[in-house]
Image (cartoon, rainbow, N blue to C red):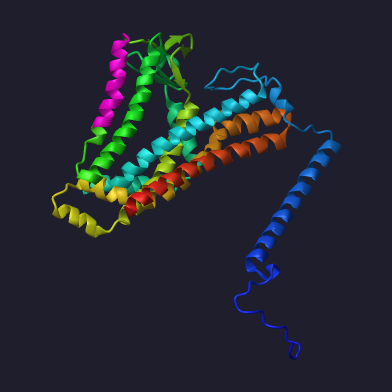
Amino acid sequence: MTNGTPPTPPAGSAPAFYNNPHVRALFYQLLLVAGIGYLVFLIISNTLANMEARGIKTGFDFLSTTAGFDILMALVDYDATHTYLDTFIVGLLNTLLVGAIGIVLSTLIGFVMGVAYFSNNWLVQRLSVVYVEIFRNIPLLLQIFFWYFAVLAALPSARNSFSLGEAFFLNIRGLYLPKLIGEPGSGLVYGAVAAAIIGIFALQRWAKRKQELQGVQLPVVRLSLALLIGLPLLATLVTGIPFALEYPELKGFNFRGGITIIPELMALALALSIYTGAFIAEAVRAGIQAVPHGQTEAARSIGLKDSQIMKLIVVPQAMRVIVPMLNSEYQSLVKNSTLATAIGYPDLFTVFVGTTLNQTGQAIEIVFMTLTVFFIINMTISFVMNWFNHKVSLAERK
C-alpha cells in the first residue's frame, strides 16, 4: 500500500461480487419488487381488516348463490334460478361475442377504406377520406347512441316488420333469422367443415412452398372457397340434408322461434366496428405509404395490373407496419365494449359489475374477476398479434 491507496487488483481478475454492476442491478430490482410486494400486502390486509370491522363479507362464496334476475340475452341456458357464477359466464360470453364481431367487421371496413384511399376514382377516394375524418373524430359513446336511439329505435313495430321472404324480419325489437337445427347425420357435415378448414391451411402452405421452389402461383382463394363450400355440400348431399330450418313466427306482440339478434347488440357492434374501422383504415394507409414507390413502378413496368400490384406486392410489405397498430386497435375495441352499459347490452361489465355488484356488494371480488378477464383477453390478443407480426417480419426478411 502506497500513500493510503488500495492495491490495484491483478489484470484479468474478476471484481468482487458486490462491485459487479450486474449483481448490484439485480439486487436493487429485487429490493424494489420486495418493496412493492410489501406495499400491496399492506393495502390488502388493511382493506380486509376494515371490511371485517364494518361487517362486510369477503370471499367468493357468493358465486354459488342464486342470482334471482333475468338477462336480456344469453348464449347458454340461463334463467333467474341460476347462480351468480352463471351470470359471470353469460356476461363473459356476450363480451367475447361482441368483441369477435367487432374485430372481424372493423378489419374488413378498415382494409376496404384504407385501400380505397389510393383509388384512381375521385369519388371512392373522397368517400374514404370523409369516412375516416367523420367517424374517427366523433366520440364512440355518441356513435353508440346514434345507432341505438336514432336508427334502430326508428324501426317499425313487430307487426309492421321489414321482411325478406317471410324468413328474415327486422323491427324495433331486433333482427329475426331462421335457425338451423341439426338432425341425425349432421355431425358428418360439421366434420366436413372442420376438414375443409384444415385443408385450406394445408393448401396455403403447399401453394406457398410451390411458389418459392418453382415460381408457380396457384389460385389459392378460389381453391379455398371451392374446398370450403364443396366438401360440406358433398357431405350434406350424401347424408340426405340432415338439417331443418326453424323460422321465426309472429305470436302475439313479438316473434317466437329462430335466432334473435337484439338491437343492443346490433347498435354496439355497428358503433365499435365503424369507429375502430376508421383507425384501422389510417393504419392501412400508413402501411401502404411506407412501401417504396419504386416497387410499384417496377411492377407496372412488367405489366402487372393495379389490383395485382396491391395484392401481391404492396399489401404483403405494408403488413409489417399495419400489424402492430392492429394489435392496439383490437385491444382498444375490447376495452371500449364496456360502453355497452350505456344502452343496456348485457356484457360482462353490465351484468357482473353492474347488477351482480349492486345485489351482493362484493366489490373487491367482482372488480378483481372483471379486471382479470379483460387482462387475459387483451394479453391473448397481444400474444396472437405478436406471433402474426413475427411471421410477417420473417416473410419480409425472406
Observer able to see residue 126: no
Q: Position of residue 253 (x, y in %)?
A: 48, 12
- Residue displayed at 31% across by 15% down: 235
Number of marks in picture: 0
Observer able to see residue 309: yes
Q: Position of residue 28 (x, y in %)?
A: 69, 62
- Residue displayed at 22% across by 55% down: 296
Q: Is residue 357 shown left or right of residue 266? A: right
* Highlighted range, magenta: 223-240
Q: Position of residue 195 (x, y in %)?
A: 35, 24
Between 190 and 254, the one lying in front of the other is 190
Q: Is residue 232 magenta?
A: yes
Q: Is residue 61 above or below residue 312?
A: above
- Residue displayed at 71% across by 22% down: 65
Between 281 and 287, the one lying in front of the other is 287
Q: Main secondary structure of the magenta part?
A: helix
Farthest residue, direction right = 53
Q: Is residue 172 above or below residue 202?
A: above
Q: Position of residue 202 (x, y in %)?
A: 32, 33
Q: Is residue 372 magenta?
A: no
Q: Is residue 297 above or below residue 248?
A: below
State the quadrant of the N terminus.
bottom right
Q: Is residue 152 shown left or right of residue 29? A: left
Q: Is residue 127 shown left or right of residue 256? A: left
- Residue displayed at 31% across by 55% down: 289
